[in-house]
Amino acid sequence: MNKNFETNIINIYGTQGKQWLLDLPSIVAKIAKEWNLTDLKPIDNLSMNYVASGLQDTQEIILKLSLDSDLIFHEKTALTSLAGYGAVPVLAYQTRALLLKKLSPATSLKTYLPDRQMEALKIACEVTRKLHQAPLPQNIKLPSIEERFSLLDKNWPIPNDYLNLARQFRDHIFYSYHERRVLHGDLHHDNILSDSDTWKVIDPHGVVGFPINEVWAFVQDIDNDIPFIAKYFGFPIDDVQKCYFMHSVLSSIWAVEDNMDPTFWLVKAERLEF
């Protein structure tokens, strides 16, 4: 396992994270026995969760483990809600563990950047449109977009003018939009993978909200992408810009919560002028 993964786990979870890292080999062995998994190999770029490829009998699989049981539950709930609409299939679930079908060839849409950026943008829009065709299940147990953005109402060590503007934009978007769907919630290029002759999504956060709250994550070039996205989905350009800003500010808050540097996300917010 790489040092970046271990550092992230300890930064986020502290003493509990250190113990989890020590226990991880026995946790993996126990789940492998329960689910009949073999040939498990951690992926190269572990970040916040333990992810390994392997086999269940003869089927290629991905095993995902997290200390955050809510994260795994929300991911499972989102993927099953979006089954048949472009989400990776779920094979099994238990608290803190998720078993997924391995996609093939599983090439990330990020590999299209920067040379095929416009093609990648169109694919991301098509994938998003397909996801949002999935009906919203009744009584679904996922956080709402309102819950997610309630963090803006607290004080954070980021510029106050950013917080105030993000609150204004949030209130405008929440007042202006009504149709709700299960959103992926983190639909950047690395979470869109090739599967045979189509594309599927992985690693959803899982949130119930408005489709306009989905599209900010795959914006690369503000001046080019935001007008294209707005036209593709029929959103006002100003509203797509506001969503990009408020989500960037929210991501900076998440970084602070995880004891990480929020600068990356604040720089994204700075790219827009209001």
Image (tube, rainbow, N blue to C red):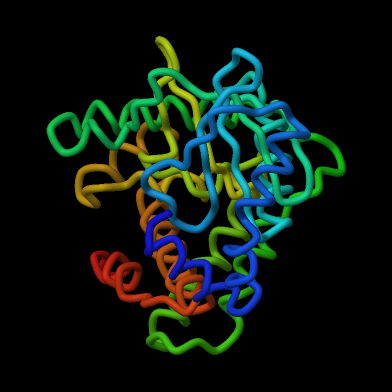
Left or right of residue 22: residue 195: left
* Quadrant of the frame with the C terminus: bottom left
- Number of marks: 0
Q: Is residue 148 left or right of residue 198?
A: right
Above or below residue 156? Residue 38 is: above
Q: Quadrant of the N terminus?
A: bottom left
The residue nearer to you, when weighing 257 against 140, is 257
Q: Which residue lies at the image location 64% right of the left edge and 47% below the top edge?
A: 206
Q: Position of residue 162 (x, y in %)?
A: 39, 79
Can I make out residue 135 in this image?
A: yes
Instruction: Please determine whether, in this image, residue 216 is positioned above or below residue 263.
Output: above
86 vs 242, left or right, is right
Can residue 167 be seen? Answer: no
Q: From the viewer's perspective, is 103 left or right of 92?
A: left
Quarter holding residue 184: top right
Q: Is residue 160 above or below residue 239?
A: below
Residue 161 x/y as whole percent: 39, 85
Q: Residue furthest left?
A: 115
Instruction: Name the residue nearer the viewer: 18 or 158.
Output: 18
Residue at 64% x, 70% y is 19
From the viewer's perspective, is residue 162 above or below residue 186?
Answer: below
Q: Residue at x 45, y 72 (%)?
A: 255
Q: Which of the 4 image quarters holds residue 29? A: top right
The percent coordinates of residue 207 (x first, y second) are 65, 50
The residue shown at (65%, 16%) is 57
Q: Position of residue 125 (x, y in %)?
A: 40, 31
Residue found farthest to the right: 139
